[in-house]
Amino acid sequence: MTPEVPKNHPRYESLVTREKIIEGMHQKIVAEAGLIAHGRGEAFDYILGENTPDFALKQEKLAVITLLKAEEPVISINGNVAVLCPNEIVELSRILEAPLEINLFYRRLEREEAIKNLLEKAGAQNIYGVDQSKQETIPEISHQRRIVDSRGIARSDCVFVPLEDGDRTMALRKLGKDVVTVDLNPLSRTSLTATVSITNNVSRAVKEMVSFAKDYKNMNSLALEDEKKRFDNKALLQEALKFMSSRLEELASDRKLFEV
């Protein structure tokens, strides 16, 4: 985070977030490709107005309920998630009783250790994905994200995979696992394949999920099931697309927007 960004800058939050990603790259936590992925997502966030719409809050509630109802939930962590919301993701892990597992596309020991250290500083105590003696592989994936922990993703029935690769989402679904994801692009393979898709900025989404998890944590299974019936993932994805489309039409019709 750089002191050069004044808090009254109209793009303050965006610039601070970019600095987190850049610093994370220098610390070997974020892969260089992670910068590109962040910028791509930020473009979609502009369309959302850089706020959480009502449909995304519903998606987050459905996501939390799905994770709470799972028998063996796991939270998959990559470099971008680690630097953008370490404290929130660790707190969510604690509330959901879902272990954290480091899983990387650009897999290097130094990155795994750097992410592990960052998560431990945020309070995480039991982190999977770094013990080579506990490794298994996901069928149908040829890249490094096929490697999973036998205590975590390998045995899980539900995986929360914010900022996910579409092919791994598809592979996990083929294995019969529920997949919860955060992806600002509602038309990505990840969004279209996941059990629950959250169309939102990951930092906002995880923070809001922590709040919902606290609310839902003490509800019994029947009450959670009744609450879950209020939401439909496909319908909410369609709502996300309609929201983005209508917002673009609204902005295109706003003549004051172009009077600089």
Image: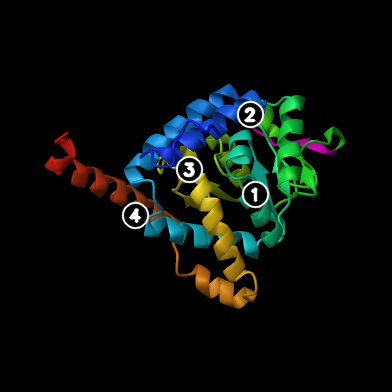
In terms of sequence position, does the residue under pointer 1 or pointer 2 come before the other? 1
Q: Residue at x 77, y 26 (%)?
A: 109
Q: Which residue is mark 2?
A: 105
Amino acid identity at mark 1? Asn
Q: CA distance from mark 4 to mark 2?
A: 31 Å
In terms of sequence position, does the residue under pointer 4 or pointer 3 come before the other? 3
Decide: few, some or many residues near mark 1? Use Cα within 10 Å; few <14, some 14-19, many ≥20.
many
Q: Is residue 65 visible?
A: no
Q: Which residue is mark 3?
A: 183
Looking at the figure, which quarter contains the N terminus? top right
Secondary element under disc 1, as helix, strand or loop, is helix
Instruction: Indicate which disc residue 87 carries.
Output: 1
Q: CA distance from mark 1 to mark 2?
A: 23 Å
Side (left or right) of 139 relative to 170: right
Amino acid identity at mark 3? Asp
Magenta region: which residues?
A: 134-141
Secondary element under disc 2, as helix, strand or loop, is loop
